[in-house]
Amino acid sequence: MARTGVGSLTLIDPEDFAEENVGRHVLTSESVGKPKVEELARHVTRINSDCRVTTFKEKFDVSLLAGRPDLIVSTADSFQAASLVNSYALHEKIPAVFGGVWGEASVAEIIYVIPGKTPCYECYGAFRRNVEIPHDTRRYTDPNYDETRIPGQAGLWANILMVAGLQFQVILGLVGLRDTLKYPGTVWLMNISDPRCPFQPLALTVAEVIKGCAVCNPDCLKELLQENLVENQGPDVSNFDPRESTFETYEKGEKISYGPCRQ
């Protein structure tokens, strides 16, 4: 993105660059032990000195943002973080792109969201609330440990570059620079190096997502209210709007489940 001449970037990540990151990252061993956001900011500046880069070594929180961004790119390895980004994007009607990998960067997974037009990240990824996460010893030492985060795994930088390139094509489509979003689906998948994956190797597989959360699908709203808001003589919810309430709930530090409704 820096090479395309983007005017400003805001980078948010709470972690330092670790040795385990070197094999799959644009940063090198010289950055080990230093904040990822600051090291990436320096890297961006070397490429495009006119790009204004703001950094926050924090977990994602909307209070960090000075203004409304034009686009959100999430590459978090935590479902909790991605879900919060999704909620903010829906609330502010900001396009968002979620990029990730399966296993050791062997399969690329890119999801894009256009609020009001496409299904959101929760419609696709809510099943990850119940997925068993590989064991991570940090759960015993980190008081802020995220139970939905995938622990670091091996992965080659060459594979990550392919994932990033695929995600970048989606970004170009969202900002109107390329006609890359002509496919009917909003999930882009690519089998990079997994011989067991059913997808054709090194080819784009596009999947459609069904609107399955209470924000995108009003049919799910009744179930959401029954499970989360109405207990016996609960409040009057006749005018409840999940697009307003979901994000406000997250801002207050509460958790509300609005995954796919059961049919």
Image: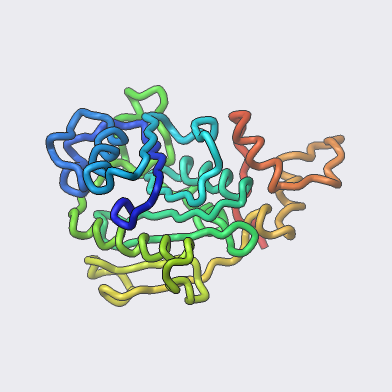
Q: 141 and 117: which one is in front? A: 117
Q: Is residue 150 left or right of residue 210?
A: left
In which quadrant of the rendered image does the N terminus lie? Answer: bottom left
Q: Position of residue 245 (x, y in %)?
A: 70, 41
| Residue furthest out toward the left | 29
Please tell me whether residue 203 is drawn above or below residue 99 in the rendered image.
below
In which quadrant of the rendered image does the C terminus lie? Answer: bottom right
The image's colour scheme reads rainbow
Total count of labels: 0
Q: Quadrant of residue 198?
A: bottom left
Q: Position of residue 74 (x, y in %)?
A: 42, 48
- Residue drawn at (63%, 55%), measured in percent from left and top? 213
Q: Position of residue 243 (x, y in %)?
A: 69, 48
- Residue drawn at (54%, 48%), measured in percent from left and top? 86
Q: Is residue 215 left or right of residue 193?
A: right
Q: 4 and 16: which one is in front? A: 4
Q: Quadrant of residue 159?
A: bottom left
- Residue drawn at (30%, 75%), measured in percent from left and top? 203
Q: Position of residue 146 (x, y in %)?
A: 42, 34
- Residue drawn at (38%, 61%), measured in percent from left and top? 109
Please tell me whether residue 9 is drawn above or below residue 31 in the rendered image.
below
| Residue furthest out toward the front | 50
Please tell me whether residue 16 is drawn above or below residue 157 in the rendered image.
above
Q: Is residue 245 left or right of residue 44?
A: right
